[in-house]
Amino acid sequence: MKILDGKKISNQIKNEIAFEVEGMKARGEKVPHLAAVLVGNDGASLTYVGSKVRSCKKIGFDSTLVHLPEETTEEDLLKEVRALNENDDIDGYIVQLPLPKHINEQKVLMAVDANKDVDGFHPTNFGKMALDMDSFISATPFGIMELMRRYNVETSGKHVVVIGRSHIVGRPISILMSQKGKAADATVTLTHSRTKNLKELTLQADIIVSALGIPHFLKADMVKDGVVIIDVGITRVPDETLEKGYYLAGDVDFENVSKKSSFITPVPGGVGPMTIAMLLKNTLLARERHRN
Ligand code: GUN
């Protein structure tokens, strides 16, 4: 069993980006500038956005946090988005999800300038990704592909079973894995809550990508020997004996499934750090495209 160490690989990627930024500074060029919009005070979102902003500082990017109150109206948020579209100093930005219920998420994501959409959530970027055109690929699926690539995990001709059809992970990773090319070429089965014979399918899988959000859902009797496990789940499970009041759990029963796996991502320290690294990578790309 080999750990797919997302923390280690994300640090490598961040060092590579920091090196690029050094070069930009040395040449007197503008450095990439990422903005993040956060509406409200959801605990997990605050943690994620804080981590994104800190990572920017560490690698030499400029960063701006636009933190709006929970009661912000859709119209006011759209105004903020338009201002970011027009602000030439900002190369890329994200609107942290989920948004409060009174705001139409699709409407907001549609308003983001596709050239600054470093999350890759705009239909233009999603569509381009699906058509093998240059685009911004969403950070989580992009991070999964990059993690597997750096560990030389073979995907060509393999059967990948994806659990979960979210727009952010399940759907895009199923497209990327099925694409033509050296880092993909897999046969993909996309499963979800209405799938009838999930265990039958996971038992056939060479690679399982679980993006479900149910702690310890995937058990050892659902996988075959030698399977590659990518655990995207990261759920806060309440535990009052801990100082934080919770612990983070993946979708996979790591203790038992890891014994049957050839490669497996831990939670935390697997896919999560890769997501941040690829967001930074997309922001660097946005800066380069913006300049050209
Ligand atoms: N919420 C959960 N994951 C993400 C992400 O990758 N980007 C944004 N903007 N919000 C999220």
Image (cartoon, rainbow, N blue to C red):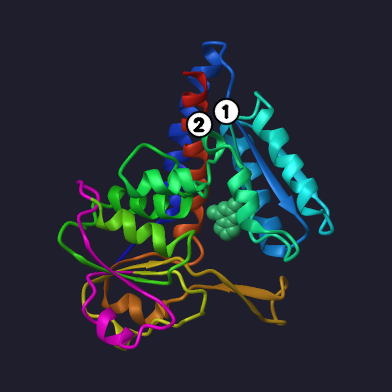
Where is residue 131? Give x, y as percent.
32, 46
The answer, for residue 63, to whether it is visible in the render is no
Instruction: Identify the magenta region.
Output: 180-208
Residue 177 counted in the magenta span: no
Kind of residue indicated by mark 1: Pro
Where is residue 62? Give x, y as percent.
65, 30
Q: Quadrant of residue 205?
A: bottom left
Label 1–label 2 contact, CB within 8 A: yes
Q: Is residue 146 above or below residue 233?
A: above
Residue 187 counted in the magenta span: yes
Tell me: 92 left or right of 233. right
Where is residue 76? Give x, y as percent.
80, 46
Which of marks 2 and 1 precedes in the sequence? 1
Considering depth in this image, is 61 or 41 the residue closer to the camera?
Answer: 41
Which image quarter is the N terminus in? bottom left
Residue occupying image coordinates x 46% and y 35%: 15
Q: Identify residue for label 1.
A: 32
Q: Quadrant of residue 125?
A: top left
Specify the label residue 286 is tagged with: 2
Report if the beta carbon of the residue with label 1 is closer than 8 angstroms to ligand 1.
Answer: no
Residue occupying image coordinates x 73% and y 62%: 100
